[in-house]
Amino acid sequence: MKKWTKLFLVFTLALSVALLAACGSSDTQAPANDDAADPSLPVYKVGTDAAYKPFEWTMPNGDIVGFDVDVINAVGEAAGFRVDIQHKGWEGLFETVENGEVDMAVSAITITEERKQKYDFANPYFEATQLILVPENSDINSLADLEGKDIGVQQGTTGDIAVRSAFGQQYSGVKPFENTPFAIQALSIGQVDAVVADNVVVMEYVKANPNANLRYVFDDAFDAEYYGFLVKKGNTELLEKLNEGLRIIKENGTYDAIYAEYFGQ
Ligand code: ARG
């Protein structure tokens, strides 16, 4: 290659990297209401497991960003509160709400009857279902095909629950991981045959990692799930604010704008 062609290539590469970095930071930057917010507003602590792209993940600089982060900030802006989002991990996340370490958990949490016994949920803000993630050349094409296979799940999630309800509570093929990225890693190195996790997270992973040679399998045996903000049982004051904020942002188009930013129309 000629010296100038080379220089030009290096320059274009550097420019695209810089541009990418700039875009990356502008649309994943901290909550819009961070700088504008009235400092006299109450601040609620929000616990999350920030390893769940695109709902919540951690930037290299430590910022927690994602769809959930934008939604809860917008809800706060509409209902008159600010939020302080903290990574707590998934295991024990609900207990941090129970013991008052945080005021709520926002973490793509599915509203389930069992969880409702112990906690209160605000109104649903997102619909999901489970998907099966497999290597491209896998012979798994349905939930039933998972029988007898090793299945990675994030421990205690609805993916974990769905697999156990399909193959038995004590099914020895369930391999629980601390977070979903660990389960997917295990799949990539052949430690498990499949991963069952929330559809959007699985789809995002496949899209972002075209060279991982993974594909996903849909099965309508998986129920529809709805995400909700989780609060301590009986915290009606906060619940009302959350529902009010959600109502406002759904009405005024803010929710749709955030949705479109992450998922398109
Ligand atoms: N929706 C699923 C559940 O509620 C998985 C949520 C996992 N969230 C996370 N941030 N890791 O069980």
Image (cartoon, rainbow, N blue to C red):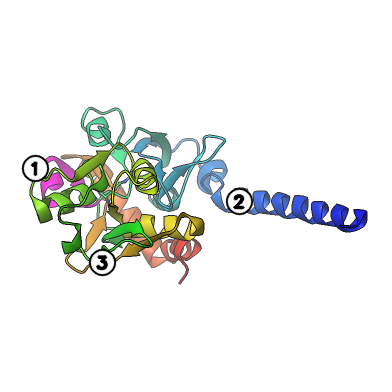
- Point out residue 84 in the picture as x, y percentages from the top left corner: 42, 36
Q: Quick one: SS at disc 2?
A: helix
> Mark 3: which secondary structure?
loop
Q: What residue is shown with label 2? A: 24
Residue 90 sits in quarter: top left
- Cα separation between marks 3 and 1: 23 Å
- Towards the viewer: 74 or 174: 174
Left or right side of 1 for 128: left
Q: Residue at x 23, y 46 (%)?
A: 157
Residue closer to the observer: 196 or 16: 196
For the C terminus, the quadrant is bottom left
- The crowding category of the residue bearing disc 3, from other C-alpha atoms within 10 Å (few below 14, some 14 to 19, many at least 20), is some
Residue 170 placed where, x, y %?
8, 42
Kindly identify the residue that appears in the image at 53 percent across and 42 percent down. 34
Dot 3 amino acid type: Asn
Location of mark 1 (residue): 170
Is 155 colored magenta in this rendering?
Answer: no
**Which portion, as a residue range, is magenta?**
110-121
| Mark 3 or mark 1, earlier in chain | 3
Task: Assign a secondary structure to mark 1.
Answer: loop
**Given the image, on which type of amino acid does mark 1 rest?**
Gln
